Amino acid sequence: MAITKFLKLVEIQTKAASMIPLLFGTIYAVYRFHVFETWHFVLMLISLLSFDMTTTAINNYYDYKKAARKHGYGYETHNAIVKYNMNPSAVLTLIILMFLIAVTAGVILFLQTGWLLLLLGGLSFAVGILYSFGPIPISRMPLGEIFSGLFMGFVIIFVSAYVHAGDRLASLTLEGGTVTLQVHLVETMLVFLISIPAILGIANIMLANNICDMEEDIENKRYTLPVYIGKGPALILFKLLYYAAYVDVVVLAILGVNPFILLLVLITVVPVSKNIKTFTAQPTKQFTFGLSVQNFLLTNAARIVALGIAVVLTF
């Protein structure tokens, strides 16, 4: 399979939704705990990227197999298997290979860290598979935004910090048949608070995708959130989720978080608001869907830069 076809199949442009949380959690661990485990980072990068590409390929493969609508922009243009006339058997083989790479890197990382990573990693793998595959995939239900936001926004950031910080965040031990989970509540709550823009931003990428695909989803019996609540309410929710992320700035200010973070995040309000207006005026996969990805990058890249500056100033 040509590399260009492969990149289209895995929708490489959407991998920012997993790579940004990985970078953010890593830099947060350096900033908060003054630690960086290079080998752990490399293993998580390989596992996360491979698994993200696997789930996207599964989603495209599943849509290809289950699609009732086989014409128009929604099918012929954005389903890579159809557009590039890919061999379904080759796609399935590739899916299995990427999954094995993700699992292998994940198991090695588990052996380097501990049981908590196995628990969170296994749960994430299960949700990732069920998101695109099974009798009723999560992506075909009105729960896609919640699952994608929480797991890609919070869990990835938490695990990214955990593989460096270890039991300074949490630990899970198995001794004599007894399982003991210890969680540092304050540190975990801080991770959750800084993850809110990522949680809501990723949820909005999914919401924007589902808004754009409403007509096709109805024909293909994908009962997503916009299909349930309607296009108008879905667009209102799209706006509110972004502005809710900025409320997080106020909470962080009260907690005394580094002012660089607050300043850079607030600067993004202007371009984000402009993108919201453009998308809600014409929500289409072809012309404006990319703005939801752009908003995610703006709000979260600002925090990564801010934390990077804080790390440099600290050292």
Image (cartoon, helix red, strand yellow):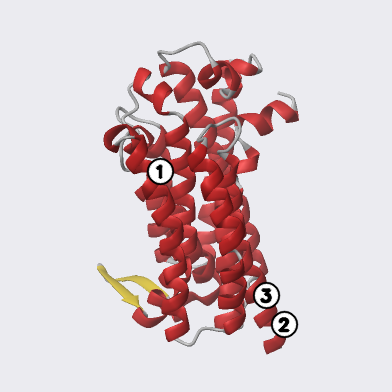
Which kind of residue does numbered mark 3 sit on?
Gly
Q: Residue at x 74, y 30 (%)?
A: 3
Residue behind mark 1: 235
Whether pointer 2 and pointer 3 mark residues with C-beta atoms closer than 8 Å, the reply is: yes
Q: Is residue 104 at least partly visible in the picture?
A: no
Q: Is residue 170 above or below residue 223?
A: below
Res 234 quadrant in image: top left
Residue behind mark 2: 312
Q: Residue at x 60, y 23 (%)?
A: 80
Residue behind mark 3: 308
Q: Is residue 142 above or below residue 82?
A: below
Q: Secondary structure at mark 2?
A: helix
Q: Is residue 53 at least partly visible in the picture?
A: yes
Q: Left or right: where does residue 105 sit relative to residue 238?
A: right
Which kind of residue does numbered mark 1 sit on?
Leu
Q: Secondary structure at mark 3?
A: helix
Residue 4 numbered tag = none
Q: Secondary structure at mark 1?
A: helix
Q: Looking at the picture, how far across and down is residue 175, in whole percent?
A: 31, 72
Q: Along the polypeptide, which appears first: circle 1 or circle 3?
A: 1
